[in-house]
Each structure stands twice: as structure tokens, then as C-alpha cells.
Amino acid sequence: MTKKDPYRPRWRASSYSGTSGGQCVEVARLPGTVAMRDSKTPGGAVLSFSPDSWTAFIEAATRADL
């Protein structure tokens, strides 16, 4: 059995992204942080959120406050 490294991101995309790729973001949970990146440029910039900030961001996005 292999041990999971909590500091190595396991990126996942939304199920709404579809299979053609392109315009979506990927999210990974790390200890104390939620990371987000552009799926088209996985080696590019990564945004980091505290868990509370991530929750506020998602709540605002679902209300279309952005």
C-alpha cells in the first residue's frame, strides 16, 4: 500500500467541464489551503485560498455576485 503525500496536489476538474477540455479550472486540496489553476496551463500560476476564503468564493460564484 502506498502512502499519500498530503503536500502533493491531486488536481481535479469540475464534472461540468466536459471531455473536450479547454475552458475550465482545476482544484486541489492541500493542508490548510485550496489551490486553483487553469487546466490549459497546468505549469502556470496557482491561486491559493484559505478554506474560509474558498467557501466564500464558491458561495459568491453560485449567487453570481462576481
Image (tube, grey):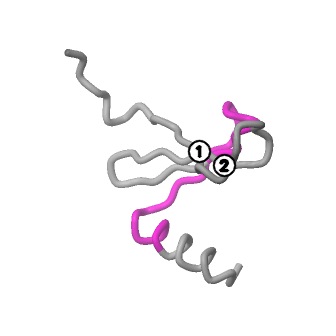
| Image quadrant where one finds the N terminus | top left
Q: Position of residue 61 (x, y in %)?
A: 63, 74
The residue type indicated by label 1 comes to Ala
Disc nearest the viewer among 1 and 2: 1
**Disc nearer the start of the sequence (1/2):** 1
Q: Secondary structure at mark 1?
A: strand
In which quadrant is the C terminus drawn? bottom right
Locate residue 40 relative to residue 4 in the image: left or right.
right
Q: Is residue 3 above or below residue 34?
A: above
- Specify whether 12 is left or right of 5: right
Residue beneath label 1, please? 13
Q: Which residues are magenta?
A: 37-55
Q: Provide residue 58's location: percent of width, then percent of height.
A: 54, 70
Q: Residue at x 54, y 48 (%)?
A: 27
Given residues 40 and 33, the one toward you in this image is 40
- Asked if the residues shown at circle 1 and circle 2 are in contact, with their CB atoms under 8 angstroms apart, the answer is yes
